[in-house]
Amino acid sequence: MPKFFRRYQYYFLLAALVLIAFACVFAFFYYLPARASLLYGPPAKDLSIPNRIEYSTRLLSYGDELTTPLDVNGAEQPFRVESGESVASIADRLEGLGFISNGQAFFDYAVYTGIDLTIQSGDFTLSPAQSIIDIARSLQNFSPSDATLVILPGWRMEEIAASLPTSGLTIAPETFLAAANTPPQVLSFAAPATMEGFFFPDTYTLPRETTLDQLLDIIGRNFAAKLTQDLQNGFAAQNLSIYQAVTLASIVEREAVRKEESATIASVYLNRIALGMKLDADPTVQYALGYQFDTGSWWKSPLALTDLEVISAYNTYQNMGLPPTPISNPGLEALMAVAYPQTTSFYYFRAACDGSGSHVFAATFEEQIANGCP
């Protein structure tokens, strides 16, 4: 090796490493996103730069899988996207039902393009002869004449709001939540502080042009229609106003995994109220804690002992009586359970140890301790 090169070999090596690093940075930050944009279109505007790089890299790793049908001779089949269904769930079902070869590839393409935010709920006709990209675009472009909003028993207002973008209604979640703080006139008989508790769980099929005020009025009227005289008489027999009864039913709804236990759980809380005991209801603490970013859930489970110390008017481990408002939106079974509870001597209950979702009930604290899991 010439003396000149021996003297400066480390500098040449360093320069080569810098060039290689530059080439890698160029490929990572410029070439891969540009290549993905050329093949699959521009990324969603809301994607951050790191996410654009990540999803561009993922899409390119799939090769022809995004554009190659699973079965070119595949027959058309029905496929339904449920209101509020996540893109991850849609992707898994598309793969499980044999429409596409790779659910993760569908998910990545949907997020990259922003289609994940515009997929419509409703009934579709899809085929394995369509590519992943074709199917994703089909789900985006579908536009039925009616919108479908599904409210599940036990949801809180924020969960209903989160389902709006896939319902077909052009109502922003944040606008919905703000308006829900002013209940419509049709609910004035209950004098609710907000509509929490009065979003009657149901499937609402509505014109797409339904306004926010119309939506709240329709849901309020549905609740009023379900509140029969028998229900009102039952609430009165328990010495509860309509608002108090709905509040208690919202707790029962969250507690009763097995609906046949609803009336027994209601009896426990009514017995505790009659005796001047605190409710000690876990769902009220979950409501107070709010959204859990680590799990993506509004209902933390299981609760830690420290959670029971949260300072909140909703914490019934710390405060006597019912929480200030309902904590969820109860269905008819929970409302009926409060109106017509079982007659029991129970003051306690806890989850059974078999993982079935059922509960074991106790009349004394000693029995409650004895019912604990080993």
Image (cartoon, grey):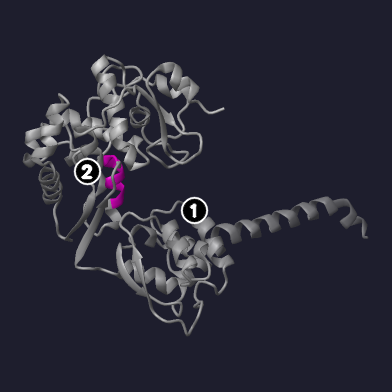
Estimate the x, y position of residue 38 in percent, counting from the top left: 48, 71
The reply to whether residue 241 is visible in this rendering is: no
Residue 84 picture quarter: bottom left
How many numbered badges does the structure rendering display?
2
Figure check: 352 above or below 106: above
> Badge 1: how crowded within 10 Å, few (<14), some, or many (20+)?
some
Q: Which residue is mark 1?
A: 51
Mark 1 to mark 2: distance in Å?
A: 44 Å
The x and y percentages for residue 30 are 54, 61
Does the magenta run of residues contain 29?
Answer: no
- Identify the magenta region: 156-163
Residue 184 % position (x, y): 10, 41
Q: Looking at this view, is 38 or 268 the one in front?
A: 268
- For the question of whether residue 104 can be seen, the reply is yes
Structural crowding at the residue carrying mark 2, measured as other residues with C-alpha within 10 Å and reported as few (<14), some (14–19) or many (≥20): some
Q: Which residue is mark 2?
A: 332
Quadrant placement of the N terminus: bottom right
Residue type marked 1: Asn
Relative placement, left or right, of 50 versus 161 is: right
Residue depicted at x 22% and y 29%: 325
- The local secondary structure at tag 1 comes to helix
Q: Name the kind of residue labelled 2 in the image.
A: Leu
